[in-house]
Image (cartoon, rainbow, N blue to C red):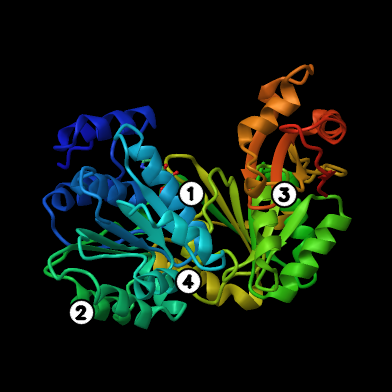
Amino acid sequence: MTTTTFSSLPLATEILTAIQSLNYQKMTPIQAHSLPALLKGRDMLAQAKTGSGKTAAFAINILHQLDVSSSQTQALVLCPTRELADQVSKEIRLLARAIANTRILTLCGGTPIGPQLTSLKHRPHIAVGTPGRILKHIQKDSLKLDGLKVLVLDEADRMLDMGFHDEIIRIISKTPRKRQTLLFSATYPDEIKDISDAIQSDPVDIRIEGLHDNNKIKQVFYEIQKGERTRALVALLQHYHPESSIVFCNRKQQCKELADELWQLGFHTLALHGDLEQKERDQVLVQFANKSSSVLIATDVAARGLHIKDIQAVINFELSPDPEVHIHRIGRTGRAGNEGLALSLFMASERFRVEAIEEYQDSPARIEKASALKTRENFRLSPPMVTLCINGGRKNKLRAGDILGALTANTNLPGKQIGKIDLFDNLTYIAVERPVAKQALRILSEGKIKGRKYRVRKMR
Ligand code: AMP
């Protein structure tokens, strides 16, 4: 039997302390299977999806292999999207917090290169980023990988789907031949096997089928009649009232229309699709993650790399024609021990898609009648928070503490009613509990933050 306590691993006290402070009580299956081999320096090819604890698995290994007394860049994590890179950096930082002077830098495209060049003057111990931008830094010689010990390709299948194959190979050609290479992928197409053969040496092959922890996800399929889809979705929201849910559509047009329709019906919904500019996408993700919106309507492409904790329900407004995509969709709920809910709507003419999923997951689908759902007339989901937006951010040297101070010092607004504060270069989003939103808006509009006045608005 595999032991699942972290203390059974030969880890430094600093790392064990951080794991303990994060309250990770035992290893997840991917951690228990991978860490003993990783810590010995083996390469690894792992089939693991988001929610499995894979980030902590490779982060712990990176920190174990790291020598902070050396100023060389010793670990590089390549990710398909900026959101995933941010998430990965965050997790590494949390695990590294007891190790003094660890430098971790995120380097992604879509953001100006200048500040990155400045940050790179102090060589990071660990770099996390997207392939295009990492390659650019290597070419500019601002990132040097001659001392690299660990290379991680996270969500490798996504990176290949996005056309990053050549960048990845060029990046790898700049790393030492003797290195530890970890490749994580949710799916296992031939391209993954090929790239593994090309860049890894005798990797441990770990497949913790995502499907097997789906017992933490309650999955129900609802058969509906033609023309009933939106009504059935409202019925699902009314019956289960999830605090937050992602509703998947197969096409972006449907995604936009559905978001408008639900909004008209009184649900706070946001749409995430490929037509959004980066700034709009950030806004949507901030509002959903800080609980100012209860329903996120998304396409598969737009939801790539999305890491949001505590999604109570994933709803398939329409089933994906690809069972693998279906499994990827529903894997966003039921993360790290919480029970998840995956609900899917289908018409009789789409039953073959349900059958394909049954075959793929090797278990029968639970099918129920939409008419059995207990709908509550006039019941609307009301998100617990409201987002305020300030026209100033990191570039104005604002920090979360300044904003919290402005809201709570000399006022009767308790700090616990303020939620997440997300700082961007020129904007800051602040989540506040709905009942105190007006008061918070007034305090910020009438007062000053660090001696300066800012424009503040409440977002819809
Ligand atoms: P990931 O699969 O890397 O996206 O991780 C999913 C979530 O699980 C993250 O929020 C982690 O903080 C959390 N997590 C990772 N390892 C553990 C663990 N051993 N126990 C509890 N939570 C964990």
Q: Any atom of ligand 1 within 8 Å of the CB at mark 3?
A: no
Left or right: where does residue 455 sit relative to residue 194? Answer: right
Count neighbours of disc 2 (C-alpha within 10 A) and say few if under 14, some if 14 to 19, many if 20 or more.
few
Residue that mark 1 sits on: 217
Q: Nearer the viewer, residue 306 or 283?
A: 283
Q: CA distance from mark 4 to mark 1?
A: 16 Å
Quadrant housing residue 138? bottom left
Q: Any atom of ligand 1 within 8 Å of the CB at mark 1?
A: no
The percent coordinates of residue 123 (x first, y second) are 33, 54
Q: Secondary structure at mark 2?
A: helix
Q: CA distance from mark 1 to mark 2?
A: 36 Å
The type of residue carrying mark 1 is Ile
Q: Quick check: 128 above or below 348? A: above
Q: Tags 1 and 3 in contact by the CB under 8 Å rule?
A: no
Residue that mark 3 sits on: 237
Q: Tags 4 and 1 in contact by the CB under 8 Å rule?
A: no
Q: CA distance from mark 2 to mark 4?
A: 29 Å
The type of residue carrying mark 4 is Pro
Q: CA distance from mark 1 to mark 3?
A: 17 Å
The percent coordinates of residue 392 (x first, y second) are 72, 46
Left or right: where does residue 275 sit relative to residue 110? Answer: right
